[in-house]
Structures are given as structure tokens and as C-alpha cells.
Image: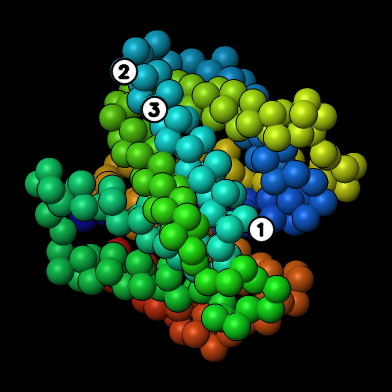
Amino acid sequence: MLGGMFTVLLSTATASLFGVADFFGGVASRRASALAVTALAHSVGLALFALALVVAPAPFSRTAVLAGAAAGVGGGIGVAALYAALARGRMSLVAPVTAAISGSLPALYDFATGATLAPTAIAGLVLALVATVIVSATSVDEPGGAPGLPPAALGLSLLAGVGFAGSFLSFSFAGDGSGFWPLATARLVSVAMIGSLALVRSAGRPDFSAEAWRPTLLAGLLDAFANVTMLAAIRIGPLAIASVIGSLYPVATVLLARVVLKEHLHGWQRVGIGLALAAVVLAAWPR
């Protein structure tokens, strides 16, 4: 019971940290290339995890390194597909599709391999997925948005969700005694993938303004901490709770956009935030 409650707490922290990191990443992406922002933010994480390996060394584990590399590939594919989808379809439709897929696939895998949860926890997971979709969706009449979700954008959104889900699943195979090896390896792979893509897209001259540095560094720092809490949640388990509660990150992004940028909060988004809070309570409810 305590393990499940700790997983909920860590996963809630993961969602909060990812959500705030996404907010700062979004702010930076308004001032510089989104791919360049992501590559630099992930480089911050790589530096932190490399330092962590020195400060808190763990035995080298080939399994952990391979799992981390697979997670880095999944994350790199997810980010690239997500940006391509956002360029072709409306953000309010791309985001919920990606978040729902990335949260539900690891949970389905967990159930398929024999995981059992209390009925209240299962209800909480379902509610969390519903809340993610509602909070991510702004309005079908979003001004300036792309027209709906064309087939190409839908396919890319699904691919992004599968990539992020694959990253989540890969971390679950890293093992408990591997320390920061899986995180450092994942960041090394994702920096190589996204950095290369950013250089190709910019013809070797990434578009990066001075105003984008601070939010990018904050995004990288928060994203790194989010990965630490995510890996801890996965190690404690169950994976289903860690993945679905962790997919509630749009809640923090939306709330921060409302408080800092004074963006309008739609009525359904308020409902979604309430459902997200209820989902966390249900998932943590004692058996």
C-alpha cells in the first residue's frame, strides 16, 4: 500500500515538474527554434546526470545502459514527431492524443503482464486519462490554429505518443541498482538525435536568441528533476500508476500559463483540473 502511495506522490511530482518545464520550454520556443531549445535543455540534463554519476556512482550495468539508450531513442522520436505534428495540426488536438497514448500504453502493458490494482486505483487512472485530454484541449475555435487534425498530423501525434510510451517502458527495464546510468545514457542519445536534427534543419546555424537562454536552462533543469522522480516512481511501481499519473503534466502547464501569461482558462479545462485532482486521490486511496 505504501509503495503505491509513494508512486502516486512521485508521479504527481513528475507531472508537475514536466508541466512547469514544458511551460518554460514553450516560452523559450517563442524566442528560438523549438528543436534548438530542446537540444540545449536536454544538454543541461546530460550534464547534470553525468555529474550525478561522479558524485553518486553506481555499478556499470549493460542492461541499464541499453534500457537508457532505448529510452533516449523513444524520447527523441517522440519529440521530433510531436513538433512535426504541431506544425501540421492544431495544438489543442495534438497534445491530448499524444498525452493519452503515452500514458495509456505503459499502463496496458503493465496490466497485460499481470499487474493488479484496487478498483479505486483503476478508476483513478481512467479519470486521469480523461482529465489529460480535457485539460490539453483548449477550444475547437482556437484562433490562429491549424485546421483540425489532418491524417498526417494524427499519425505523427500517435507516433509521438508511442515514442514517449516506449521511453517510459524502456526505463522500467533498467533495474533498481543502476543509479543514474539509464538517465545519463538516455540524455546522451536524445541530445545526439535532437541536436543533429536541429543542425540539419538550421543548415548548421541554429536560431537561438539571447532571450531564450534563461527559460531554456530552467526547462532543462526541471526536466532533469522530472526524469529523476519518474524513474523513482517506475522503480517503486506499479508502472500503470507511474505512467498515467505522470501524463497529467498539461495541468501544471495550463495553470502556469494562466497565472504568469494571463491566458484564458476555458470552462472545460477547469473541470479537467478538478478531475485530475480527484484522479490522484483515487489512485492513492488505500486498498
Residue 233: image location, x then y, percent: 36, 45
> Picture quarter containing residue 91?
bottom right
- Determine whether the residue tagged by mark 1 lies in a helix, strand or loop: helix
On screen, residue 239 versus residue 92, left or right, reads: left
- Residue 63, which numbered label? 2
Q: Earlier in the sequence, mark 2 or mark 3?
A: 2
Residue neighbourhood size for the residue with mark 2, other residues' Cα within 10 Å, grouped as few (<14), some (14–19), many (≥20): some
- Residue 23, which numbered label? 1
Residue 18: image location, x then y, percent: 55, 52
Residue 116: image location, x then y, percent: 12, 54
Amino acid type, callout 1: Phe
From this view, report whether residue 49 is shown above or below residue 285.
Answer: above
Q: Which residue is mark 3?
A: 70
Amino acid type, callout 3: Ala
Quarter occupied by the C terminus:
bottom left
Q: Is 151 in front, or is 79?
A: 151
Quarter occupied by the N terminus:
bottom left
Measure the alpha-carbon separation of dots 2 and 1.
33 Å
Q: Which of labels 2 and 3 is toward the front?
A: 3
Q: Are marks 2 and 1 in contact (CB under 8 Å)?
A: no
Residue neighbourhood size for the residue with mark 3, other residues' Cα within 10 Å, grouped as few (<14), some (14–19), many (≥20): many
On screen, residue 101 versus residue 36, left or right, reads: left
